[in-house]
Image: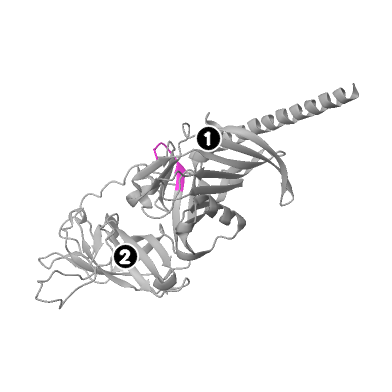
Amino acid sequence: MRTRLALLLAMSVAAQAQDDAKELLLRVSQRVMEAVNRLPKYICTLTIDRAEYKTNGIVEAHSCDKLAAEKEAGHLKRRLFASDRLRLDVAIGKTQEIFGATNEMYSWVGENRFDNRGLLDLVQQGAISTGAFSTLLVTIFGEDRATFSYNGDLTVDGRMLSEFGFRIPVEKSNYLYLFGRDRRRQLRTAAEGTFLVDSKTLELVRLTVRHALPPEADACETSQTLDYGRVTLGGSDFLLATEGRLDILSLADEMENHMAFSACHEFTGQSTLSFEPPPEPSGSATGSSDPAIPISALPPGLAFKLAFIDPIDTAVAAAGDPIRAKLTAPIRARSSGVLVPEGASVSARIVKAEHLFAENKSFVLAVKLESVVIGGTVWPLKAAPDYGVRRFAKRPGLTHRISLGLLNASQDPDVGIFDFPGAAPNYVIKGGYASNWQTLAP
């Protein structure tokens, strides 16, 4: 009788623990979704530091399972191949992103507008992921996609936390892995992972999402971890992602992204939030040297020179950062009339800031011109870099040949790429760096 009573008591305690865990999960889910539903009022800056590593040894001898085991044990050998940095603004709005049903919107930092561009339109190369700001939370906690488990309690940094597991089958998953040239191939994959919660405060502390990729993909697996904390916004505190890590492991290389959210703020009367491209200016500019024709109709093929005003520290520069420039010579019409005067201020933006290591050590800076100021009026400026390559007639024998480098079909024609061979990670491009450009048709 006593044995049966003890067994019944043990079963009762186990059932109570299960009920308590489910109740905790429900309450945490409610808190998470309350925070997500308030996010459309806010905008945050997202900084992404990306690194690409090459694995050492004979990669053909590895399988994905063996590679993952080596990484888990800390035995995976690798060398840094390249790194770069991105800086963007992220907000919530009514749009669709290619990585599934989500309403996250992205723009380069400080643009103060969002349009129908997705993150993959802004960042066309390298490893990138969407969903860290809100979509992963909605997928896991706000929709009937995941099944859950309670994995027990553990102590992390002196804090008692409860761990839960989750799994989303492929038929319910909205996760797409894009790969191949121009990311045109895609695979829908299942998702699984864990999350840690504080049972006292009902706060989500950490979320880890893993995706095992099928053999036809170009990688073995992806893993993303997000840390959460209370952030003061609009005079109150609520949950936001503070930083995260993305890891993509393949037989040939490993790509790691470190994400940090900062400068989160509420939309105010001083904030400008536009969901459409800015209107084209009308009329003609005025000033000491009025253009003969409106800048919006500037003829293509006009050569001009400009110089970056400020030094660029490659240790902190990021794609998305605005930079200042000025014309060092006027833009003239073919009739010799001045259309844009010398000294006019030009706004530009970095679209790539990449360090290359190993034997090809260098820093690659890619810049896109955005606008020019004439007589206090801002006009759009569309231009392509002029690298000085001209056509010439071929003569018998190889007497003259100009190297054109790699052909990147996905690169925008209005982006200037400048290579600084041998540049160290802390290299500084001095202010006054000059370059040649040509106007393009609007």
Q: Is residue 94 magenta?
A: yes
Residue at 76% x, 29% y is 14
Please tell me how many numbered marks the rendered image carries.
Answer: 2
Q: Mark 1 belongs to which amino acid?
A: Ile
Residue at 79% x, 25% y is 12
Q: Is residue 11 magenta?
A: no
- Element carrying mark 1: strand
Q: Position of residue 249 (x, y in %)?
A: 49, 53
Q: Position of residue 202 (x, y in %)?
A: 67, 37
The residue that label 2 is drawn on is 417
Judged by its main secondary structure, the magenta piece is loop
| Residue sitting at the far front | 61
- Element carrying mark 2: strand
Q: Position of residue 349 (x, y in %)?
A: 36, 59
Residue stretch in magenta: 90-97
**Location of residue 387 with respect to 41 vertically, above or below:** below
Q: Mark 2 belongs to which amino acid?
A: Ile
Q: Position of residue 203 (x, y in %)?
A: 65, 40
Residue 50 visible, this angle? no
Query: Sequence-wise, which precedes: disc 2 or disc 1?
Result: 1
Colouring of the image: one colour
The residue that label 1 is drawn on is 168
Q: Nearer the viewer, mark 2 or mark 1?
A: 1
Query: Is 385 left, or right, of 255 in this rendering?
Result: left
Residue at 11% x, 65% y is 334
Distance of label 2 from label 1 (alpha carbons): 42 Å
Query: Is 9 left, or right, of 227 in this rendering?
Result: right
Residue 365 visible, this angle? yes
Closer-to-camera residue (326/390): 390
Quarter of the figure with residue 116: top left
